[in-house]
Image (tube, rainbow, N blue to C red):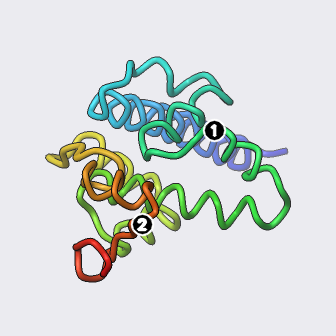
Amino acid sequence: MDNTLWSLIIIFIVIGIALVILMIAAMWKVFEKAGEEGWKCIIPIYSNIVLLRIVGKPWWWLLLSIIPYIGIVWGVWQLNMLSKSFGKDEGYTVGIVFLPFIFLPMLGFGNAQYLGPFGNPAAFKAYGNKEGFDFEQNKLAD
């Protein structure tokens, strides 16, 4: 192989390592904003359990996420709950799904504040109590 190819390979490796470091730092800050210790984001399975706790879902959702195809839906849903927990909307979720190396650092290092699971702990609790919560109208369902 010539030197140009090796140079490109080294550049891609350096960019890849930089992106991994950026994503770890971003998730570290997201965890800290949510009241968890930042180091928990680097433990592979435990980080997902902690993330489920941040968005207000039980640990057994992790089992649902390993089902083929269903796991993709659960993962996107979990990211949607994460963005709503920080006061963001579905558009932000689309950004996290398709450009996570931009939107997760914005969430972690930006001015977004953790508002609780789904962004409103009282509303989420009411929803969990089967009373229902209309997220469209931002009120308890009649």
Across the whole image, how many numbered discs are drawn on residues? 2
Between residue 105 and residue 64, name the one nearer to us: 64
Q: Assign a secondary structure to mark 2.
A: helix
Of residues 75 and 16, the one nearer the viewer is 75
**Residue farthest to the left?**
111
Q: Quadrant of the N terminus?
A: top right
Say left or right for 101 vs 48: left
> Left or right of 86: which side holds 17?
right
Residue placed under numbered mark 1 in the picture: 13
Name which residue lies at 24% across and 82% down: 137
Q: Position of residue 75 (x, y in %)?
A: 62, 57
Q: Earlier in the sequence, mark 1 or mark 2?
A: 1
Q: Position of residue 49 (x, y in %)?
A: 59, 33
Residue type at numbered disc 1: Ile
Secondary structure beneath disc 1? helix
| Residue drawn at (68%, 48%) of the image | 4
**Spot occupied by residue 5 in the image (x, y as percentages of width and height):** 73, 49
Q: Position of residue 96 (x, y in %)?
A: 44, 61
Instruction: Quote the CA–CA distance across marks 1 and 2.
Output: 28 Å
Which residue corresponds to the image point at 46% horizontal and 17% vertical from the top-left? Answer: 39
45 displayed left or right of 110: right
Q: Quadrant of residue 114?
A: top left
Is 8 drawn above or below residue 72 in the view shown?
A: above
Q: Residues within 10 Å of mark 2 (few under 14, many from 20)?
A: many
Q: Nearer the viewer, residue 45 or 11?
A: 45
Disc 2 marks which amino acid? Thr
Residue at 43% across / 55% down in the picture?
129
On the image, which quarter does residue 118 sit in? bottom left
Q: Are marks 1 and 2 in contact (CB under 8 Å)?
A: no
Q: Which residue is mark 2?
A: 93
